[in-house]
Amino acid sequence: MLHSKPREDNYLHKGLRKQLVQVLRDKGIKDEKVLAAIEAIPRHFFLDPAFERIAYEDRAFPITANQTISQPYTVAYQSQLLEIKKFDKVLEIGTGSAYQACVLAELGAMVYSIERQKALYDYVGQFFFIKNYPNIKRFYGDGFKGLPTYAPFDKVIVTAAAPYIPPALIEQLKPGGIAVIPVGDDNGQKMLRIIKDANGNVKEEELGDFIFVPMLEGKNK
Ligand code: SAH
């Protein structure tokens, strides 16, 4: 549950975040800036107060509209693959709870995030914490189309299971840019890292196995 009123972030929460960061280190996350962003962001703000403690376990959780807030490991893993630099323009598909968007914004990125579910898009607009990040711009739309008006982007991240690499997203990537996209079906996805070189040629790397909610065509009211 995303709340419109500020909530408390106390020593207990901060301690649980330190433990979570240690868990992520043990699972192989090495990027210190990513780990610092996870340590800085109160993940419990993104969940119902009933989940305060388990907010810092390394697991995904249901949010509203049958969607999930990604597992911290997944958020850290995708963020690390993106090699975010300050002021990078990043296109995110699947705003969801906006936790991933906040991690990218904490890393100094200019985040352009698209959500296809109107209810979820509106819901995040009410969330007090998102107001700390003027560098996040949110859009209600279909991520398969990207955001041609704002292209090109330094980085692209898809946080839903794509059935294939959406061509528009690769078109909207700058030469030298990186896209991180989980591609597969309901049974599971492979994380792909796609790098566009200075000449516009594309190279694809296949990484670990993940399970995301599906990336669906079109907008939903
Ligand atoms: N990044 C989110 C995880 C979201 S779960 C977080 O940190 O919480 C995936 C989200 O992708 C869902 O909210 C779903 O509605 C959205 N989604 C699925 N297909 C989409 C599409 N074509 N365009 C935009 N958003 C999409």
Image (spheres, rainbow, N blue to C red):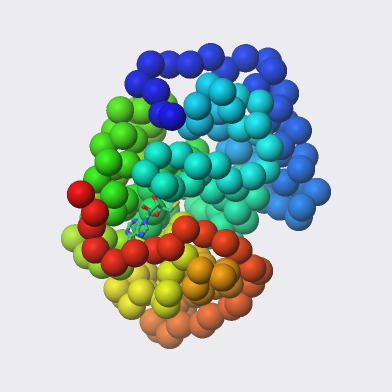
How far across and down, in percent of the image, does residue 63 sit? 45, 39
Which is nearer the eye, 152 or 191? Answer: 191
Q: Residue furthest right?
A: 26
Vertical position of residue 104 compared to residue 162: above or below: above
Vertical position of residue 217 compared to residue 76: above or below: below
How far across and down, in percent of the image, does residue 127 sit? 36, 28
Vertical position of residue 97 compared to residue 140: above or below: above
What residue sits 38% from the left and 16% below the top? 5
Horizontal side of 30 relative to 176 (left or right) equals right
What residue sits 49% from the left and 73% below the top? 185
Vertical position of residue 181 compared to residue 139: above or below: below
> In this orientation, does residue 90 appear?
yes
Horizontal side of 37 relative to 16 (left or right) equals left
How far across and down, in percent of the image, does residue 52 sit? 60, 24
Horizontal side of 220 relative to 155 (left or right) equals left
Give the position of the N terminus as an image quadrant.
top left
How far across and down, in percent of the image, does residue 10 sit? 62, 14
What residue sits 72% from the left and 31% below the top? 18
What residue sits 29% from the left and 67% below the top? 217
